[in-house]
Image: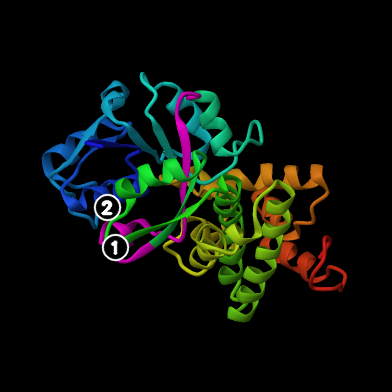
Amino acid sequence: MNKIGVLGGGAWGTALAQMLASDGRSVLLWARETELVEEINASHTNSLFLPSARLAQTITATSELPDLSECEAILVVTPAQHLGAVVGNLTKAPRDLILCSKGIEASSGRLMNDVAKDAMPESEIAILSGPTFAHEVASGLPTAITLACSGADEQWQRLKPVIARPQFRPYYSDDVIGAEIGGAVKNVLAIACGVVDGLGLGQNARAALIARGYAEMLRFGETLGAQRDTLAGLCGLGDLVLTCSSTSSRNFSLGKALGEGQSAADLMADRRTVAEGAHTAPVLHRLAQERGIAMPIVQAVNALLDGAPASDVVAKLLARPLKAETGPAA
C-alpha cells in the first residue's frame, strides 16, 4: 500500500499522519483550512492544532477531497458529527476506511461504523481506538491501541503493516461495536471526572467515579452487543483511565471548567477543538432511557450540559439509594 490518507487536520489527525510517516512512508493529510494546508506544506508544522510537533517531510497536505482518491486506506479523523457528510463527499471509495473519531451521531443515534457504511458502502470499515493523547503519539512515545476490523482476519492482515510502528502497537479485535462504544462512552465519563476535579472532591471520588462509570459502559455496551472483554481492554477501560485523569483530555478539561463554575454554553462557544463528549452525552442519555439502561453518571453529565449547577448534580448523585454494587440496575 503506497499512499495512506488521513482525513482531518486537527491534533489527532496530524499526530496519526506523523506516526504513519515515521518509517518514511508518504501520507496525504486532508484539512479543511487552506491556511493550515499551506503551513504544513511550507513549514511542516501545524501551529493551529499541534504546535509541539515538527512534521515529517513525507506528509503532504491538501484541502481537496479528490486528491485522496489514490489512497487504498484512509484514516477518518473528522469530528464525529461531521463524519458522514465528509466521507460521503469522497470521490472514490477506498478499500479500507479506518475510523478514528469517537462518538455517536446525535441526529440518529447511530455509531460511526453505521454512518460510514451508509456514506461509503463499498469500503470495509475498521475502528482504531485506545488510550492515545495526540501530542504523545506525535512525539513517538509508546502507544497501544485496538484495531477492530469488520472484515475480520483478512482485513487485519492487510492493515496491520499499514498501522503498526515500533512505538505504535495495534491489537486485533473483531468487535467493532465494542470498540466504538468504549470510545464514545468514555468521553462522557471524562467530563464527569473533570467536574470532580473542578469541584475539588479529591482522588478517592474520581477513582470511584471511574469504576462506577465503567459499570455504566459495560451495561450499555453489552445491551448493544459489545463483548465484555473488548470493553475491558485498550479501547474501553484503557481509554477511560487515560481520559479521566488528565487535563490533556479535552473532555476532562471541559468538565473541570464546569466544576469550577463556568457555563456550558460559554465553554462550548469558545472552544476551537471539539470535546466530543458534549455532543455524545445527550444522545447517549436518550438511548439509555429508551433501552432501560441505568446510567446515572451519563444522566448527570447531560444535566450539567443543560445548565444545572455542578454542585447540585453531584449532590443528587450522592443521594441515590444504596444498593448492590453489581447487577442490571446498579
- Measured as percent of width and height from the top left, residue 29 is found at 27, 37
Query: In the displayed structure, would residue 219 be above or below residue 124?
Result: below
- Count of all numbered marks drawn on residues in the image: 2
> Residue 167 got which mark?
1
Label whose residue precedes the other's in the sequence (1 or 2): 2
Could you classify mark 2 by the number of other residues whose Cα lies within 10 Å: few (under 14), some (14-19), or many (20 or more)?
A: many
**Residue extent of the magenta highlight:** 120-143
| The N terminus sits in image quarter | top left
Question: Is residue 116 something one can see in this rendering?
Answer: yes
Q: Tell me the colour scheme of the image.
A: rainbow
Front residue (pair 52, 218): 218
**Residue 288 on the magenta span:** no
Query: Gap in Å between the C-alphas at discs 1 and 2?
Result: 9 Å
Disc 1 is placed on an element classified as: loop
Disc 2 is placed on an element classified as: helix
| The C terminus sits in image quarter | bottom right
Query: In the displayed structure, would residue 253 be above or below residue 33?
Result: below
> Residue 19 got which mark?
2
**Residue 130 on the magenta span:** yes
Residue at 28 percent across and 56 percent down: it is 165
Are circles 1 and 2 on residues that touch, CB within 8 Å? yes
- Measured as percent of width and height from the top left, residue 162 is found at 30, 46
> Residue 66 got which mark?
none
- Measured as percent of width and height from the top left, residue 14 is found at 29, 46
- Measured as percent of width and height from the top left, residue 238 is found at 51, 65
| Residue 42, picture quadrant | top left
Q: Amino acid at mark 2?
A: Met
- In the rendered structure, the answer to whether residue 289 lies left or right of residue 113 reads right
